[in-house]
Image (tube, rainbow, N blue to C red):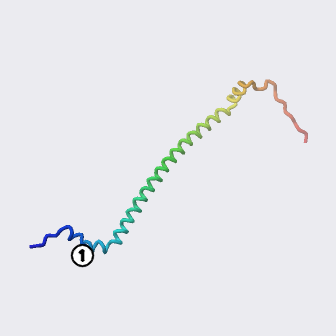
Amino acid sequence: MAKKRTLRDYTALGSMGAELILQNLPFVLFLGFLAIIYIANAHFAEKRVREVFELQKEVRDLRREYHSLRADIAFNSRRTELARQLKDKGLGQSIRRQKKVQVPD
């Protein structure tokens, strides 16, 4: 009859499984190191993607604000709008004809 093996037999250093693990321990540690690098790289990439999305959102908002301000400036610099704003302050267009000043050479 075959001898019944216990858990102690499998974990003993003299068994074939433990010997195989000890022989390949540097490779197992290398694989563990690669797994840690892989996980760290994934976290780093996710962080960068989130930063890019936030910056894209900020650029969109700033572009909207820029276009809005540009439209306001274009509207406020029209001649009729300037005349209306100056009229509120008591200034207006001159009724008299402008004189041309010529400087002799």
Percent position of residue 91, x then y: 75, 26
Residue 15 location (% of width, % of height): 23, 74
The x, y position of residue 4, in whole percent, is: 13, 70
Residue at 31%, 75% in the rendered image: 23
Vertical side of 35 occupied by 87: above or below? above
User: Which residue is the extreme one toward the left?
Assistant: 1
In the shown orientation, is residue 4 left or right of residue 90? left
x, y percentage for residue 77?
Answer: 68, 34
**Label 1: how many residues lie within 10 Å, few (<14), some (14-19) or many (20+)?**
few
Question: Is residue 32 shown above or below 51?
Answer: below
**Residue at figure coordinates x 22%, y 70% from the top left:** 10
Q: Nearer the viewer, residue 39 or 57?
A: 39
Asked where in the image residue 101 lies, by quadrant, the reply is top right
Image quadrant in which the C terminus is located: top right
Image point 35% across, 72% down: which residue? 26
| Residue in the foreground of this view, choosing between 91 and 93 | 91
Tell me which amino acid carries mark 1. Gly
- Answer above or below: position of 42 versus 30: above
The residue under the point 39% across, 65% down is 34
The quadrant of the image that shows the N terminus is bottom left
* Picture quadrant of residue 36: bottom left
Residue linked to disc 1: 14
* SS under mark 1: loop
Residue 97 image-quadrant placement: top right
Q: Along the horizontal axis of the image, is 92 left or right of 66?
A: right
